[in-house]
Image (tube, helix red, strand yellow):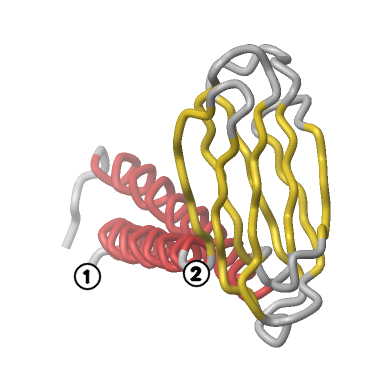
Amino acid sequence: MKKPLLFLVIGGFLVVIGIGLSVYATQLVIENLTTQEGFIGSGMTMEMYKELNPTKNENGVYVIQIDDFQGVGGIIISVFDPLGNVVITKSIDYSPFQDSFGISMAGMYKLLVENSADEEVHVIAVIGYLPQDQSLTVSIFGFVVILVGLVGLVVGTLYFIKSRGKPNVS
């Protein structure tokens, strides 16, 4: 097999492997999250629940995205532990908003989104485990493999173009 073809094949293979690793890392993150979407009118609330366990991960995360957010104000987020105690309460002043919280006990955690603004808002809310080192490592490794594969494709292509102009003497 000629060198340019070898670089192209190996580079393409590495890109495919890197994409596969990136998809797998994304799946590791997404499977631990619960998402809910909806419109919340003035004075209304949206609740969502997620079973969380500190033996799996001691850190939880929630993300709030409000469409067409223009400093609406009046959006308050609260996270409750399984006993109904408030773990964290925040007022949203930008979108998307992300924050983490501690998971102290196993059970059903509640994310409450309250709208005290004068207008209805479209909210996308997410709650779950904060991504762990394992999924982040797989994601970074996948990205590096894609980069190495792309470099191999570029080197193989340049080598192929360079060697194409030379006469083949056997």
Give above or below for 116 relative to 135.
above
**Camera-side residue of 24 and 11:** 24
Residue 62: x percent and y percent?
Answer: 66, 51
Among numbered discs 2 and 1, the one appearing first in the sequence: 1
**Residue neighbourhood size for the residue with mark 1, other residues' Cα within 10 Å, grouped as few (<14), some (14–19), many (≥20):** few
- Left or right: residue 15 versus residue 104 is left
Residue 24, image quadrant: bottom left
Q: Residue at x 76, y 76 (%)?
A: 58
**Residue neighbourhood size for the residue with mark 2, other residues' Cα within 10 Å, grouped as few (<14), some (14–19), many (≥20):** some
Residue 143, image quadrant: bottom right
- Left or right: residue 25 versus residue 119 is left
Residue 53: x percent and y percent?
Answer: 66, 80
Amino acid at the residue labelled 1: Met
Q: Residue at x 28, y 63 (%)?
A: 9
Amino acid at the residue labelled 2: Leu
**Camera-side residue of 26 and 113:** 113
The residue to which callout 2 is attached is 28
Q: Residue at x 25, y 64 (%)?
A: 2
The residue to which callout 1 is attached is 1
- Left or right: residue 100 versus residue 166 is right
At mark 2, the secondary structure is helix
